[in-house]
Image (tube, rainbow, N blue to C red):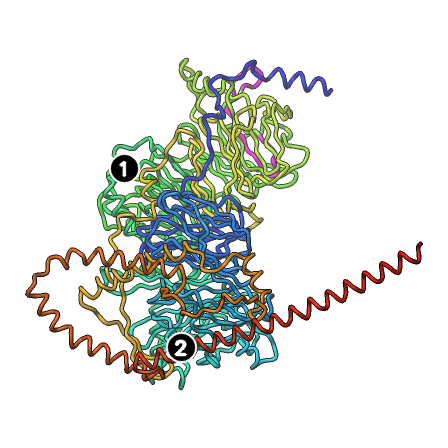
Amino acid sequence: MFVKKLVEKASLKKPGGNPDSLKSDDVNPRPIFHYGLPSGCNLFAHDPIQKILAISTIDGRIKLFGQDNTQAVLESPDALPSKFLQFIHNQQFLININANNHIEVWNIDLNSLAHVHVYKEEITSFTILQNTFYMYVGDPIGNVSVLKFDKEQCNITQMKYIIPFSASHGNSTADHTNAAVMYILPQPSAESKRVLIIYRDGFVSLWSIQESKPIFTTGGTLIQSLNHDTKKVTAACWACPFGSKVVIGYNNGELLIWSIDDKELGGTQSGPLFKLNLGYKLDKIPISKLKWAYADGKSSRLYVLGNSDFSSANLLQVIIINDQIESRTTKLGIGTPEPCVDMEILVSYNEQTKHKEDCFLVIGKSGHVYTYDDSSIEKYLIQSQTRSPPSSLPKEIKVKLPYVDTIITVAKFITDNPCMLMLSSNEDYMLMSKKIPSLFSFESKQKDGSSSSSSTSGFTSFSNFKNIYITGHSNGGINFWDASSPLLIPIVSFNQQSEDDQTLSGVPLTALCYDMETRLLISGDQTGTVRIYKFKPEPYAIESSFLSLQASSKKGSNIVQSVKLVKVNGAVVSITTSHDSKHIAVGSDQGYVSVIDIGGATVLYERRIASEISTAVISLQFGMCSLHGFEKSVLMAATKDSSAWALESETGNILNNGSVHPKKPSKALLIQMLDEQGTAGRGSNASKGIIGNSFDDGIVKDSLLLCSEKAVYVYSLSHAVQGVKKVCYKKKFNSSICCWASTCCSDAGLVLVFTNGKIEIRSLPELTLLKATSIRGLALSTSKPNSLPDSSICASQNGDIIMVNGDQEVFIVSVLQQREIFRHLDSATRVYNKDLIVPQGILVEHVKEKKKGIFGSMKKVSKPQHERETELEASRESFEELSTLFAIANFALESESQENIHTDEDEVDLDIDDIDIDGPEEKPKGNTMMGALNKQKLTSKFNAFKGKLKEMNVKKEKVQVKEEQPRDDQKTGSVDQIKKKYGFSLTSETSAAKMAQNKLSDNIRKLKGINLKTAEMQDNAQTFSSMAKEMLRTAENNDRRTS
């Protein structure tokens, strides 16, 4: 029996294969566009100049959102979550550090990975020094390294400049388990000069980059002594625009505000400036994130986020930071649908309304993103400070697809419109793409969080669109979209209708079928109602910009000519049309197959299939087969348990006494009849003058394709019609479950989509694997009984796939190698604008502080143009100095440092030559690094002023000499006053005498040290001599005994 089956199987295979069949070189399944939010979001990053938002995921993806609805996806080589994610502002580079401490540099202009730097140590903190390509990296042992990204070479190098733990922290006895650098914060308005380093143990050090030493320290043992428990730093941020106050959050829920004084060299602070009581410490909730938002006047705010592992009603709070905080704390607890893991503020300005449209975003623990109107938060807090009652609490809105108010339950995708006459212009597309609201915009958000989209203005014909996407929704709505470009633009939308003009809303659609040539749209819903829409001939009359047909009748409709209703038994599951589009076959979840005459809207026959396990009719197809030497028009049906049934098309009589099904039943996905000649023979019968009846195309099929969740089979059609199971080809799925299947390329290929995101392309009928790919982040699930599907998948005849995952994201996949489905694909994915002209106010923002209380009121002050240019030039020179500073080793090598640690200053060998009688030679102040830097600065300034000095005439020089004399006197007086203030003498003679006295004391100390050292050496010599004599006597005694 086994040998017989092998012979039969071999006899069906064509020798040499079909030369016109689909080849592996013809296909290349790949995602070409992603719209919406990716699943598993965990971290934000924002470029305020380019207006780009980046969201990383737990599986190594980074989604970019730019202006005008531009979007792009970056996939890291490793599917790991991000630890740090930051933009180099107004540059085409994004830095991502994953859980393996790999530093990835992404070129967001090309949407490609430019460089990966493998860092050898664990990275505990990371900060980009903006306006440069330098980066600070902190490690667990308390050291801070400086990295530089070379834009030309596209690589990262480590600079010689370091900030060691011993120099910055200065406590060698500190617990090194808590020595990790948690935050590195360049000081605002002095980013190139000072940086604030915050350690896990709470120690805070303000480091001077030029002097290579801490100039102010606080925290650490100061806070640990106040409490018996050891608390650790978990969050920190600046709380003023010029870097004089910092807010630090701890793992025990405390929030402390520390004052940072960069003018008191070597100074320390005895304790925190202020303590914020927000309830986190009471519940022992660690502070997870802190973010400070500066605002004019008295409305600067601090956003506080508690750890997501704890449950509390006020994990997210906002507090006003101003001069009134000592007497009154104004705060707002923001209720979130779930605990959150990150937050970000998007600052935007509407040119039309001349108002701010700032968004406050949070990422939930589930990966969903929620947005708040930040202006409403600010308004609520300001009103809370007054006697007037505040407005309603700000409400969160879940970020979802802006054009999907309800879940898509069924969809159709039509590419290469056969009725297309004229494409819409590029200008129309660019205009419409800007009008469509972004994911984070409040412009079109309604109270329930849904969004309304405007359709194409002046819509007159479907023939203007190359691709059309049709969606049926859970509320009964039907939407047509222009899918000629990646950004779906709405064309027309309407709800389910009846002939008596009664709109039925809220009934989910379960099946759709559309024929462009005959202008027929057929829909089926859960109540078993089949609606047949007949559209009017094109062109249509121009109405308003949104062609909504919710209240239109068959007589007054702009598009619909007639609507006919037919009722069937059970919820509609599948719909297919006959070859001439005069009949439709409808399958229901109760096992009924109904054939309806479209013209009369009458049911020709209805048959119930009595399946053994599940009777739901999942898939239907009209066709012709060979039966007992005659051609027979049949209607093939597949039930949910993967059973195949054959019905006579004209009468509905069941031809096979028993169904054809696999041994182990599984949910059926697709049934399709395949012809005898393959791709080359399609339509051969029609070319010979053989024309089928109204049900089929007259082409005799010989194979039956049946795909289920666990396997795909190719049966002999002639045998299946007779109820005989004859398997020609089969393929079982062992690794994962198949959730969707469709044929493509004129039934020459089979597209399979699996729940784990894998996509396979197989040839037909051999089922040979041509290509396979996995889409990261695509996680699908099989539909549950008596429930709506969580995702929607549909494909065109060429295999172009649109997958909508709930209301969050859309994947668009292309299958063929040499095929471009969309126009404007490059512009839709270009988030970086390299031609952006940055306003002057973004680069230079002067803030003036009015001292009053702990927090002074701050306001922006406009400066003259020449002062702004001077500040820009000074800032640019300051940043240029960093290249010299960071290129020179400011501390000895680690080996030399370790040797110096074990060497005590008092134990250094002294020599008589060490005594300096004549005094030290004149040396420039500062270390070698500063000497090189000062030399470079003096040289550049001298060359700049050299030309100007030569042009001065003799008369002006004399006048200038006369005017400079009192200035010198005044300068001398000022120096004397400063010396007097700090306790120095006013005359050079006295200073010289004091210097001589100090030098004499130093020489006496050195002489005493030499004398002590000499005496010690003499004692050691005597001891050694005594030991040698003793050893000699012992040796002589031993010789005598042995002799």
| Label 2: few (<14), some (14–19) or many (≥20) C-alpha neighbours in 10 Å | few
Residue 1008 appears anywhere in the view = yes
The amino acid marked with disc number 1 is: Asn
| 16 sits to left or right of 294 | right
Which quadrant of the figure has residue 303? bottom left
Question: What residue do we see at 40% from left, 86% from top?
Answer: 327
- Identity of the residue drawn at 64% across and 26% down: 725
Q: What element carries label 2?
A: helix
The image quarter containing residue 918 is: bottom left
Q: What stretch is highlighted in magenta?
A: 626-645
Q: Is residue 641 magenta?
A: yes
Q: Local crowd at mark 1 within 10 Å, few (<14), some, or many (≥20)?
A: some
Q: Which residue is labeled 2 in the image?
A: 996
Label 1, label 2: how far apart the Cα atoms are: 96 Å
Q: The residue under label 2 is which amino acid type?
A: Ala
Residue closer to the observer: 883 or 233? 883
Query: Is residue 731 within the magenta segment?
Result: no
> Residue 870 lies in what quarter of the image?
bottom left
Disc marking residue 464: 1
Task: Please tell me which of labels 1 and 2 falls first in the chain.
Answer: 1
Classified by dominant secondary structure, the portion drawn in magenta counts as: strand
In the rendered view, tell whether residue 587 sits above or below residue 1034: above
885 up-or-down from 681: above or below: below
Q: Quadrant location of the N terminus? A: top right
User: For this rendering, which residue is in front, 891 or 45?
Assistant: 891
Quarter of the picture holding the C terminus: bottom right
